Image: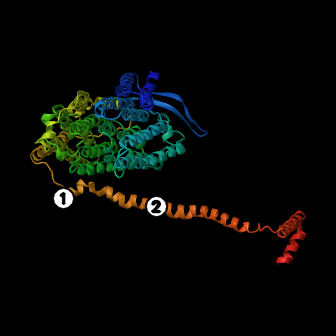
C-alpha cells in the first residue's frame, strides 16, 4: 500500500513531464491520452486507498528527511487518513472528468499549446494532491504554492491577451498576500513547539506549550492564507477575474482544487482552532459576510462565467461559516457536494459557450433548451442542487451548516438563509435567461447551435448524477439518517462541536429555507423567461453590476499609490539617486583623467622635477617616525 500512495501524485507529475517536454513532437491524440490516463489511474488508486483507510484507519508514509536542522526535523511524508482520502477522490475524480471534457473543448488549439494546456492541468492536480497528502504544514505549503503557480499559468493560458495576463498577475499577487500569513504561521509553530508535523502538533503535550495568544495568532495567520486561497473578503477579487482562463480551468479551480485548499487546511487544523474562540468567531463572520456580499453581486452579472464565479465565492463563504461555528463535517460535506454541482455548472456553461462560438453574455442567449437538451437538463439539476432544494445534494450540506449557525447565533442563520434565497434567485435568473424563452441572436446563428459532443456531455451526465445523490452520504439524524460522512471523518475532525436543536425547530428551519428558495425560483423563472434583463442596470443595480466598485476602490487606495511609490523609487531614488551616484563617479573619473593628462606636456625638465619630488616623498616615508610628525606639525600648524 505504501507504494500505491506515492503513485497518486507521481502519475499526474509524469503526465506533466511527458506532455510538457514532448509538446512539439506528440500528436493531439497522444497528448489527450497521456493527460487523461494519468489522472484516471490516480483516481483508481485513490479509490483503493479510500477503502483501505475505511477498513484499517489512517497511516503516515515517510519517504525521506526533507529538512534536518539542529532545532527541528521535517520529513517529506504523506498522511493518508479519512480526510485526505476523501479529498483524493474529489480531486482525481472530478479532475479526470474535467480532463476528459477538455479533449473536445480545447481541440482548436495547436498541438504544442494543446500539450501545454494538459501539462498545466496535470501539474495542477499534482500540486493539489501534494497539498492534501502532506503529513506536515511544510509539504502542504509546497503544494499550496504549486497550485498558485498553476493557476497563474492557466488563467493566463491565452497569454497574447494582456487582459488575461493582468488577471493571472492579480491572482498571483493576491495569493502571495495570503501565503505570507501561512508562512508566518509555520515559523511561529516552529518557534513555539519545534515541529510542524500533524501527528506531533495535535498532541496534548505539544498543544500545552501554546498559550491562548499563541493559538490565536497561529490560527489567524493560517486563516489569512485561507482568505487568499479560498477568496474571502478582502482578498476575493482575483477569483472572478480568473474566468479569463479556459472554462475547464474555471471548473478545476472553482470546484475540485484550488479554492477548497483553505477549507481543507482549517479542517485539518481543527484541533488548533478549538483552542481559539476568537479565531472561530472571526472565521464565521468573514465567511458569512463574504457569502452574502458576493451573492448580491451575482444577481446582476450578465457574463455566464462571472455569475458562477461569484456563486463560488458565496458558497465558499458558507463553508467558512461552517468552520467558524465548529461544524467541520458540514463544511467538508459542502466542499464535496459543491464540487459536483459547481463543476457541472462550469462545464455546462462551457458547453453553452462552445456551442455559441465563445459568446458569454447571457443577454445574447435564450431558448437553448431545445437545441441543447443534455446541457439543459444537467444544468437545471445543478441549479436545483445549489439552490438547496431537497432531496438534491446541496440541501443536506447547506442545511447542516445553517442548523449549526442557528445553534451558535440566530443572526448567523438569518443572514445565511437570506443568502440561500439570493442563491436560488440568481441561479434561476441565469438558467431562465440562458435556456428558456426565445433565442435572442440572429436566425443564422441559431441554425448553427447544436449539442456538444459526447466526450463533453458524458462528464455532464456523471456530475449531474452525483449532484443529485451525493447528499445521501450525510443524511442527518433528524431525517432518519446516520450521517455516514460524519462517522467516517470523526477520527480526524475530533473537535466537531455538537449542537442541540429541537427536531420541531430544525424541521421549521428546513421548511423555511426550502419554501423561500422555491418562491425565489418561481419568481426568477417567471420573470426572466418572459422578459429577461437586456438593458444596462441603473441605480443600485448598476452598483451591483459593477461589483460594488470594490476593484475601483482597491485601484484607488492600493494599486495606484503602490504604482506611484514604485514610479518614485524607480525614477527618483534609483535613477537620480543610486544610478546618479554611480554615473557621477564615472563622470568624475573621466574628468580627473582629462585634467591629469595635461601633466604629460612633453617637457623633460618637468618630468625630472616630479621624479625628484616623488623620491623625496618616498625617502621621508621610509624614515617615518615621530620627528617627521613634529616637522609636519611645525610646517602646517
Q: Position of residue 136 (x, y in %)?
A: 48, 36
The residue beneath circle 1 is 538
Q: Position of residue 462 (x, y in %)?
A: 24, 28
Q: Position of residue 248 (x, y in %)?
A: 30, 36
Quarter containing the C terminus: bottom right
Residue, x 32% and y 48% (percent of image)?
241
Q: Earlier in the sequence, mark 1 or mark 2?
A: 1
The residue beneath circle 2 is 567
Decide which of 147, 152 is in the foreground and name it: 152
Decide which of 491, 204 is in the foreground and name it: 491
Q: Position of residue 612 (x, y in %)?
A: 87, 67
Residue, x 29% and y 51% (percent of image)?
289
Does residue 90 appear in this view?
Answer: yes
Decide which of 279, 78 is in the foreground and name it: 78
Instruction: Give the image quarter of residue 84.
Output: top left
Callout in the foreground (1, 2): 2
Amino acid at each position: 500500500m505504501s507504494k500505491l500512495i506515492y503513485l497518486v501524485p507521481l502519475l499526474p507529475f509524469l503526465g506533466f513531464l511527458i506532455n510538457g517536454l514532448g509538446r512539439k513532437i506528440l500528436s493531439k491524440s497522444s497528448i489527450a491520452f497521456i493527460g487523461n490516463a494519468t489522472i484516471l489511474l490516480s483516481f483508481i488508486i485513490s479509490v483503493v486507498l479510500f477503502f483501505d483507510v475505511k477498513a484499517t484507519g489512517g497511516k503516515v508514509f515517510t519517504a525521506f528527511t526533507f529538512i534536518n536542522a539542529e532545532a527541528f526535523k521535517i520529513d517529506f511524508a504523506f498522511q493518508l487518513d479519512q480526510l485526505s482520502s476523501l479529498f483524493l477522490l474529489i480531486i482525481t475524480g472530478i479532475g479526470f472528468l474535467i480532463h476528459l471534457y477538455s479533449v473536445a473543448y480545447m481541440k482548436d488549439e495547436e498541438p504544442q499549446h494543446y500539450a501545454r494546456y494538459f501539462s498545466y492541468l496535470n501539474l495542477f492536480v499534482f500540486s493539489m494532491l501534494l497539498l492534501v497528502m502532506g503529513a506536515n504544514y511544510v509539504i502542504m505549503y509546497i503544494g499550496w504554492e504549486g497550485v498558485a503557480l498553476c493557476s497563474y499559468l492557466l488563467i493566463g493560458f491565452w497569454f497574447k491577451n494582456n487582459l488575461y495576463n493582468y488577471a493571472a498577475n492579480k491572482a498571483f499577487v493576491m495569493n502571495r498576500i495570503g501565503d505570507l500569513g501561512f508562512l508566518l504561521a509555520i515559523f511561529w509553530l516552529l518557534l513555539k513547539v519545534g515541529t510542524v508535523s500533524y501527528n506531533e502538533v495535535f498532541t496534548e503535550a505539544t498543544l500545552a506549550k501554546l498559550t491562548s495568544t499563541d493559538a490565536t495568532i497561529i490560527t489567524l495567520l493560517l486563516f489569512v492564507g485561507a482568505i487568499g486561497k479560498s477568496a474571502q473578503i478582502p482578498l476575493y477579487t482575483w477569483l472572478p477575474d480568473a474566468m479569463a482562463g479556459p472554462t475547464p480551468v474555471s471548473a478545476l479551480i472553482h470546484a475540485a482544487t484550488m479554492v477548497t485548499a483553505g477549507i481543507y487546511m482549517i479542517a485539518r487544523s481543527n484541533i488548533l482552532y478549538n483552542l481559539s474562540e476568537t479565531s472561530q468567531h472571526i472565521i464565521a463572520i468573514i465567511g458569512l459576510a463574504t457569502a452574502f456580499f458576493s451573492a448580491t453581486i451575482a444577481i446582476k452579472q450578465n457574463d455566464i462565467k462571472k455569475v458562477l464565479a461569484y456563486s463560488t465565492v458565496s458558497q465558499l463563504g458558507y463553508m467558512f461559516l461552517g468552520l467558524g461555528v465548529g461544524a467541520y463535517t458540514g463544511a467538508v460535506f459542502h466542499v464535496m457536494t459543491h464540487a459536483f454541482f459547481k463543476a457541472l455548472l462550469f462545464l455546462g456553461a462551457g458547453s453553452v459557450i462552445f456551442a455559441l462560438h465563445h459568446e458569454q453574455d447571457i443577454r445574447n442567449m435564450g431558448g437553448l433548451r431545445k437545441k441543447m437538451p443534455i446541457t439543459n437538463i444537467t444544468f437545471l439539476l445543478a441549479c436545483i442542487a445549489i439552490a438547496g432544494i431537497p432531496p438534491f445534494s446541496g440541501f443536506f450540506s447547506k442545511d447542516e451548516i445553517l442548523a449549526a449557525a442557528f445553534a451558535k447565533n440566530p443572526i448567523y442563520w438569518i443572514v445565511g438563509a437570506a443568502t440561500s434565497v439570493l442563491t436560488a434567485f440568481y441561479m434561476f435568473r441565469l438558467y431562465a435567461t440562458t435556456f428558456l424563452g426565445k433565442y435572442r441572436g440572429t436566425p443564422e446563428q441559431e441554425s448553427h447551435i447544436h449539442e456538444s459532443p459526447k466526450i463533453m456531455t458524458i462528464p455532464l451526465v456523471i456530475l449531474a448524477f452525483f449532484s443529485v445523490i451525493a447528499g445521501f452520504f450525510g443524511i442527518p439524524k433528524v431525517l432518519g439518517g446516520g450521517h455516514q460522512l460524519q462517522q467516517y471523518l470523526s477520527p480526524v475532525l475530533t473537535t466537531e462541536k455538537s449542537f442541540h436543536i429541537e427536531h420541531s425547530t430544525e424541521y421549521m428551519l428546513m421548511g423555511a429555507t426550502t419554501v423561500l428558495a422555491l418562491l425565489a425560483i418561481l419568481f426568477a423563472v417567471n420573470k426572466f423567461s418572459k422578459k429577461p434583463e437586456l438593458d444596462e442596470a441603473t441605480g443600485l443595480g448598476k452598483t451591483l453590476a459593477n461589483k460594488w466598485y470594490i476593484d475601483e476602490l482597491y485601484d484607488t487606495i492600493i494599486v495606484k499609490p503602490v504604482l506611484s511609490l514604485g514610479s518614485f523609487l524607480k525614477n527618483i531614488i534609483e535613477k537620480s539617486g543610486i544610478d546618479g551616484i554611480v554615473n557621477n563617479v564615472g563622470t568624475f573619473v573621466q574628468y580627473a583623467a582629462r585634467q591629469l593628462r595635461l601633466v604629460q606636456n612633453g617637457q623633460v625638465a618637468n618630468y625630472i622635477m616630479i621624479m625628484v619630488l616623488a623620491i623625496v616623498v618616498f625617502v621621508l616615508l621610509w624614515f617615518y617616525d615621530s620627528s617627521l610628525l613634529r616637522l609636519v606639525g611645525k610646517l602646517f600648524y
